[in-house]
Image (spheres, rainbow, N blue to C red):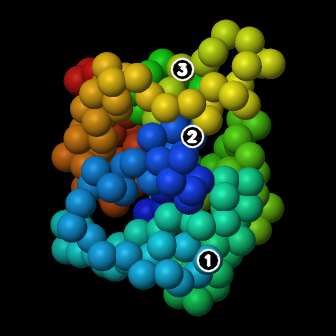
Amino acid sequence: MFLLAGLGNPDQKYQKNRHNVGFLFLDFFDKNISYKKKFKSLFAEQDINNHKFFLLKPLTFMNLSGEALAEIKKFYKLDNSNIFIIHDDLDLEIGKIKVKSDGSNGGHNGLESISSKIGNDYNRIRVGIDHPGSKDLVEKYVLTDFKKKELETINKSFLIIKNNIELLIKKKFDEFNSKVNNIL
């Protein structure tokens, strides 16, 4: 069993914000998935490449994402090595993708919350949203919508992730990163 959790903020006004990359990916991944409210989240089950996946969009708002992750991890007794969190990353240019297991949370409040609740040894799928240039602009920047061209780039990145999900399942992160970076 695997968990793919997309980070974002649940309110409609945040729907296309840079900070909502995780929610946007899950919507892109399969537009026909029917979610139900469970684990302080929108929750669904999906078979992906013959593997059972739980899909999760925490409804706790970004800064409390760990609450939702802790509930589902405990309920299904999930191992952190089978948990994938997809989230925005200011340190990567728009649409760039990096996957890693554990490590620093880079000041990302959603990841900080998750690490405080389940530990730090889970997998991260980082999707670049660029940096506004000044630390003082970050909070406002992540809560602004993608421009049309940026969203096109993000969707191309999502397709690459979707097409290479088997490498993630098999934890072949170096191969995934190399392949993705050669495409982008």
Counting from the top left corner in percent of width and height, residue 24 is at 40, 48
Is residue 74 visible in the rendered structure shown here?
yes
Q: CA distance from mark 1 to mark 2?
A: 19 Å
Whole-percent x, y for residue 119 in the image: 73, 63
Say which label, 1 or 3, has the lower sequence index: 1
150 sits to left or right of 29 = right
Residue that numbered label 2 is attached to: 19
Quarter of the image containing the N terminus? bottom left
- Disc nearer the start of the sequence (1/2): 2
Q: Quadrant of residue 107?
A: top right
Point 48% across, 18% down: residue: 93
Extreme residue toward the top, this view:
133
* Residue at 80% from the left image edge and 19% from the top image edge: 136
Within 10 angstroms of label 3, few (less than 14), some, or many (20 or more) residues? some
Q: Is residue 115 above or below residue 182?
A: below
The Cα atoms of the two marked residues, 2 and 3, are separated by 11 Å
Label 1: state its secondary structure: loop
In percent of width and height, residue 173 lies at: 40, 43
Q: Which residue is mark 3?
A: 130
Q: Residue at x 45, y 76 (%)?
A: 43
Image height check: is 12 above or below 54?
above
Q: Nearer the viewer, residue 55 or 122?
A: 55
When asked about the image quadrant of residue 143, the answer is: top right
Q: Nearer the N terminus, badge 2 or badge 3? A: 2
Which label was assigned to residue 40? 1
Three-letter code for the amino acid on which mark 3 is drawn: Asp
